[in-house]
Amino acid sequence: MHILILGGDGYLGWPTAMHLTAKGHHVAVVDNYLRRRLCREENVEPLFDVPNLHERVGLWESVSGYKIPVFIGDLADWEFVKEVFQTFTPEAIVHYAEQPSAPYSMLNRRAAMLSLQNNLTVTANVIFAVREFSPDAHIVKLGTMGEYGTPNIDIEEGWLEVEHNGRRHKFLYPRQASSLYHTTKIMDTDLLWFYVRTWDIRVTDLMQGPVYGLFTDETADDERLFPFFNYDEIFGTVLNRFVVQSVAGYPLTVYGKGGQTRGYLNIKDTLNCVRLSLEQPAKAGELRIFNQFVETFTVNELAELVQRVGNQLGLNVQIRSVENPRKEAEDHYYNPAHTGLLELGLKPHFLTDEILAQMLETVLRHKANIQEHKIYRKVKWS
Ligand SMILES: NC(=O)c1ccc[n+]([C@@H]2O[C@H](COP(=O)([O-])OP(=O)(O)OC[C@H]3O[C@@H](n4cnc5c(N)ncnc54)[C@H](O)[C@@H]3O)[C@@H](O)[C@H]2O)c1
């Protein structure tokens, strides 16, 4: 399949590009280095440098023999999008190309506007490009479990059958996000759903939980192929942050009561979920939604797990509850369905002590790079 990966330089985009080529697909990657630029601007660079996208593609070709064309440019710019779609006509598109951080979107007005404009414009451009240049192409869009918020009822996979005054109708599951970033993802879903109904495009929306990890089958131990690994509060996901905090001797920052429950997944599972969705596409005129995670943890559970495994490795891991900078429920009901991807064939990688130990050992090798002041800056919601 000819697959265009939008955001191909990102934490998930680069490993996805390697994975899909290794599975026999033809892949091109597109990125404008927005993630790298925002990290530099906010002084929160990842734990170790990663080569630029051209260099990564060269390294991967030397290791695997697979070639990946690179397009560097802004997907919010229609002329650039046109050029990409006309040069590499895709049968499928993986759309990762967004500003992906909740705290970044809450920093200030400028960051909020960047998140809104970038995320919605890129999504709209992708829809228009598919309509104009590849009308049968399947869009696999990364959404987030955060779109649903934490309602006091079970969370279904995307849709809810509602009975009202004796009549029934199926709606998108009600969504109420707790950051502006997550709200842009809700707006993305609304845009996609509108054009699915109007133009019969085919879309899979993957409502993903926080991802952790560095290793995939394609990177193996070759650190030159690793994705970004952010450990700061803005771009680092929680488990990745806790691992670095343990190594740095910095108490794990649990926000408030720590009862916040979310669905998590290993980066290897992200790659498999995306590939399985591509290989078994949505139908024309279908918005197919899967909840993409494999197990749930409270923040306290994650912190205790990291503490136990870290201490086994000789670290002295402390946990500290800090005043919650976010506006969110700290203790709530959480029961989301997640069977769709298992039915497509996903074989989950659960969070084991061995996986955590492997992450801790990798970070220990880069301990000298950790800059403590980058770990926690208290980006407040209000
Ligand atoms: N990482 C997670 O835990 C997680 C969880 C849920 C959902 N997601 C979603 O998955 C997607 C990928 O996340 P990630 O962690 O890899 O983020 P990332 O920031 O590492 O990757 C996104 C990539 O898109 C690029 N990009 C953004 N805007 C662009 C534009 N206008 N033109 C060209 N390139 C652009 C960025 O430079 C970056 O390389 C995002 O949409 C995110 O919202 C991620």
Image (tube, rainbow, N blue to C red):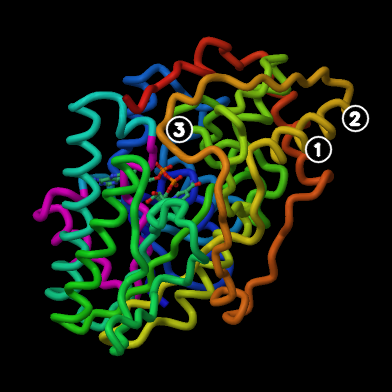
Residue drawn 71% across the image and 59% down it: 349
Classify mark 3: residues with Cα within 10 Å, few (<14), some (14-19) or many (20+).
Answer: many
Residue drawn 51% across the image and 27% down it: 46
Of residues 179 and 134, the one nearer the viewer is 179
Q: Which residues are magenta?
A: 75-102
Looking at the image, is mark 3 or mark 2 earlier in the sequence? 3
Q: Kindly identify which residue carries mark 3.
A: 235
In this rendering, position of residue 77 left or right of residue 314: left
In this rendering, position of residue 345 left or right of residue 133: right
Residue drawn 23% across the image and 80% down it: 201
SS for callout 3: loop
Residue drawn 40% across the image and 33% down it: 327
Q: Kindly identify which residue carries mark 1.
A: 357
Q: Is mark 1 within 8 Å of ligand 1?
A: no
Of residues 320 and 292, the one nearer the viewer is 320
Looking at the image, is mark 3 or mark 1 earlier in the sequence? 3
Query: Residue 4, percent across and down?
Result: 35, 64
Indicate the amino acid at tag 1: Ala
What numbered label is drawn on residue 312? 2
Q: Are marks 2 and 1 in contact (CB under 8 Å)?
A: yes
